Image (spheres, helix red, strand yellow):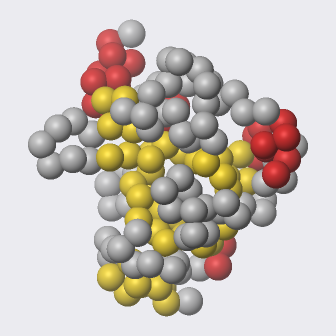
Amino acid sequence: MKLATKAYGLIEVDERQKINFPDGLFGFETIRDYVLLDAERQPFFWLQSMEVEQVAFVLVNPFLFRPDYEVNINNEELAEIGIHSPERALIFSIVTIPPDGPMTANLQGPLVINRDTRTGKQAILSDTRWKTKHDVMAELAAVRKS
């Protein structure tokens, strides 16, 4: 199917790239259907709204720069999107790239996606180690030094 995207204009996407967030994302609760796209620069991805062309998020796997990251989500929340085994989950963090500051990732509100059903949700973690703005490059440099 063809989809108008913020980053790439009109492109062809496969049905298998479609992700449904039944509750939407925080601040975007009414937008529920997205596609997951590879970004031109690895290790990033785009989460592009299928409904509103200008709504798209840059995502990253948080374990790449925080190997100690823990996503403690209760089983009831996981069951809401059909996850009964942790290895069936994809975990992403939303990245913010401001024009005048460091690139940050939200580790407090990860996106959890069921690999099999392509259904997802945004969780809120209560662990005080995880904030909404983690400096990706600084934390990546710290991982490389250790």
User: Dividing the picture into quarters, in which one does residue 109 lie?
Assistant: top right
Residue 68 appears in the picture as rendered: yes
Q: Position of residue 104 (x, y in %)?
A: 33, 37
Frontmost residue, 90 versus 74: 74
Front position in the image: 142 or 84: 84
Kindly identify the residue that appears in the image at 51 percent across and 62 percent down: 28
Quarter of the N terminus within the rendering: bottom right
| Residue 96: x %, y % from top left | 32, 46
With respect to residue 80, does 110 lie above or below? above
Relative image position of residue 37 (x, y in whole percent): 48, 66
Q: Residue furthest bottom?
A: 2
**Is 49 drawn above or below residue 46 in the view shown?**
below
- Residue 124 in picture, x, y percent from top left: 60, 37
**In percent of the image, x 78 and y 43: which residue is there?**
77
Q: Residue at x 50, y 24 (%)?
A: 130
Name the foreground residue: 133 vs 93: 133
Against 133, is 59 above or below?
below
Residue found 28% across the figure and 24% down from its top:
138
Q: Is residue 41 above or below residue 8?
A: above
Outermost residue, left side? 100
Residue 91 visible at all: no
Image quarter hosting the C terminus? top left
Q: Is 16 situated left or right of 99 in this image? A: right
**Residue 69's image quarter?**
top right
Name of the residue lying farthest toward the top: 146
